[in-house]
């Protein structure tokens, strides 16, 4: 199964509209495409009426799930508007506060509940896919898996995160009774479905699915915790602490030592007006306490009793359990590349490896810096927080970026403030006063930038804009976004992954289209 499809999904979601730039209405267009990936985790947002003469544009590239990218797209604009810095007229400071407050908010119960709802919608989509019509390739794949050993099927299910979430959801509903009748077709005692009486060709897919998954679901249903421990061990997590300790935990009653009394207590107060500085000096002394409280609250939100271990026993809480390590925002996160256009000023904030690029007289100007573990400043922070960068340039063998919102499994060093953890949500913020030669702005996920560099993207868009100008047709910017996605899409997945990722792009003009090119540009064309 793995992380790729047998053929790409090239359908695109597009939008078009106008935003105000320097008191003029300028066009924008967007497109998102799932591509070869099994799941779509990119999200874009455009808020044309963010504030007076002010628009908000953002690209959020999720990893480990779409819940954090969706959450950021919904709430980061509100965090910015509510920040002390923004309300005081300091947009750069406001962005710093907004990113960090959004990251902290992921540890609270209401954020966890919202992200769980986002994931449940994905699980429901997965159920529809599993219960829908399979293509010939899918039936062939299921037939092959029907003859695979169970351990290999388990490993394949682990690699397919959407399917794994679906199967665990099934096991949760059937925990303890071993009944799977509602989810899969009837099977015998060995978990192998009978092909007799299934209703002909329409039910062949049920036969194949039953043969592959029935025993796995039975394992999860009848022996829930041991199966989860096995899954998490195969996923490389240190979740199993031995049968004796597990039995002791099951026998314990009441709250554990150090458990917070107020289950709904947020990690950070909603009112942040008392904050004075963008560098978070008032918050840094409290971050260690918040990290511990956040872990406790995550356990409470997931129905765990848990409490803190001894002070010297590290980041893992006794009540965290398997659910904590699988919780939303712990192993999932998102980049956040955002541009605020306020009259004639661009404010660009970035955490991660999505990118914002300006075309100025045809020249590409990077307005954000990709955050990669190999960068000296990023490496220094990662190692100071106790992490390492492996030979594949990944943090602790996991992320290939060094900043992101979420990913709290990398943010457990209680001696450091949140912004100094291995993976930091703290953004770089760049400001630019618009010049007469500035033409358009591009925000895109790394699915685009891994295929083309900044200048190549600017050249591509400029050429398409000139084609429309010369043809005297109406400009539809989403069409150019779609063409760029198609140009970056790989023909197959037999490569290093280039052109196989989700792709999302926003293009916005910075002046009216008929003023975009001067006579020299037209003569050169």
Image (cartoon, rainbow, N blue to C red):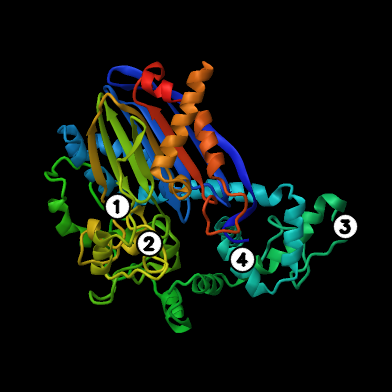
Nearest the viewer among 337 and 147 is: 337
Crowd around label 1: few <14 · some 14–19 · many ≥20 (10 Å): many
Nearest the viewer among 39 and 249 is: 39
Q: Quadrant of the N terminus?
A: bottom right
Q: Which mark is residue 525?
A: none
Crowd around label 3: few <14 · some 14–19 · many ≥20 (10 Å): few
Question: What kind of element bears circle 4?
Answer: helix
Q: Which residue is mark 2?
A: 299
Of mark 4 and mark 2, the one earlier in the sequence is: 4
Q: Which residue is mark 1?
A: 425
Q: Is residue 372 above or below residue 83?
A: below
Query: What x and y, as percent, mark residue 470?
Result: 50, 19
The residue positioned 53% from the left and 56% from the top of the image is 497
Question: What kind of element bears circle 1?
Answer: loop
The residue positioned 12% from the left and 45% from the top of the image is 277
Q: Which residue is mark 3?
A: 197
Cα gap from disc 1 to disc 2, whole angstroms: 22 Å
The residue positioned 34% from the left and 53% from the top of the image is 404
Residue 291's quadrant in the figure?
bottom left
Q: Is residue 25 above or below residue 246?
A: above
Cα gap from disc 2 to disc 3, whole angstroms: 46 Å
> Can residue 220 be seen?
no
Are the residues flagged by discs 3 and 1 in contact, CB closer than 8 Å? no
> Can residue 136 be seen?
yes
Of mark 2 and mark 3, the one earlier in the sequence is: 3
Are the residues flagged by discs 4 and 3 in contact, CB closer than 8 Å? no
Q: Which residue is mark 4?
A: 156
Query: What x and y, as percent, mark residue 292?
Result: 27, 63
């Amino acid at each position: 199964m793995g992380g790729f499809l047998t053929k790409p999904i090239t359908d695109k979601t597009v939008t078009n509209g106008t935003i105000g730039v320097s008191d003029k209405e300028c066009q924008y267009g967007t497109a998102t495409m799932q591509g070869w990936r099994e799941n779509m985790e990119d999200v874009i947002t455009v808020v044309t009426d963010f504030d007076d003469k002010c628009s908000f544009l953002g690209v959020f590239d999720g990893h480990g799930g779409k819940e954090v990218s969706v959450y950021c797209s919904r709430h980061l604009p509100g965090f910015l508007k509510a920040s002390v810095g923004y309300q005081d007229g300091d947009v750069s400071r406001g962005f710093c506060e907004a990113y960090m407050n959004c990251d902290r908010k992921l540890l609270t119960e209401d954020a966890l509940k919202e992200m769980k709802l986002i994931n449940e919608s994905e699980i429901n989509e997965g159920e529809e896919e599993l219960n829908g019509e399979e293509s010939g390739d899918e039936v062939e794949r299921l037939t092959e898996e029907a003859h695979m050993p169970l351990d290999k099927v388990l490993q394949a299910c682990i690699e397919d995160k959407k399917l794994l979430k679906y199967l665990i959801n099934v096991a949760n509903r059937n925990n303890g009774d071993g009944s799977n009748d509602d989810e899969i077709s009837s099977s015998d005692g060995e978990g192998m479905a009978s092909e007799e009486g299934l209703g002909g060709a329409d039910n062949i897919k049920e036969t194949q699915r039953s043969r592959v998954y029935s025993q796995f679901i039975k394992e999860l249903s009848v022996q829930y915790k041991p199966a989860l421990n096995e899954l998490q061990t195969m996923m490389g997590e240190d979740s199993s602490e031995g049968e004796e300790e597990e039995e002791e935990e099951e026998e314990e009653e009441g709250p554990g030592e150090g458990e917070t009394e107020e289950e709904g207590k947020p990690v950070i107060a909603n009112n942040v007006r008392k904050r004075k500085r963008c560098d978070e000096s008032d918050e840094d002394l409290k971050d260690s306490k918040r990290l511990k409280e956040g872990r406790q609250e995550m356990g409470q939100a997931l129905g765990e009793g848990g409490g803190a271990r001894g002070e010297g026993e590290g980041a893992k809480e006794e009540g965290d359990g398997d659910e904590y390590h699988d919780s939303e925002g712990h192993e999932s996160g998102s980049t956040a590349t955002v541009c605020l256009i306020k009259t004639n000023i661009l404010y660009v904030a970035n955490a991660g490896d999505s990118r914002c690029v300006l075309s100025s007289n045809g020249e590409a100007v990077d307005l954000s810096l990709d955050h990669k573990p190999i960068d000296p400043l990023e490496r220094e922070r990662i190692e100071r927080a106790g992490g390492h960068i492996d030979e594949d340039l990944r943090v602790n063998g996991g992320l290939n970026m060094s900043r992101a919102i979420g990913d709290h499994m990398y943010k457990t060093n209680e001696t450091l403030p949140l912004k100094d953890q291995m993976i930091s949500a703290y953004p770089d913020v760049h400001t630019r006063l618009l010049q007469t030669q500035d033409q358009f702005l591009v925000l895109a996920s790394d699915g685009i930038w891994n295929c083309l560099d900044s200048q190549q993207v600017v050249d591509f868009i400029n050429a398409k804009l000139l084609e429309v100008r010369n043809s005297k047709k109406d400009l539809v910017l989403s069409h150019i976004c779609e063409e760029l996605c198609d140009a970056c899409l790989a023909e197959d997945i037999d490569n290093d992954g280039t052109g196989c990722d989700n792709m999302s792009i926003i293009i916005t003009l910075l002046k009216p289209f008929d003023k975009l090119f001067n006579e020299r540009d037209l003569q050169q064309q």
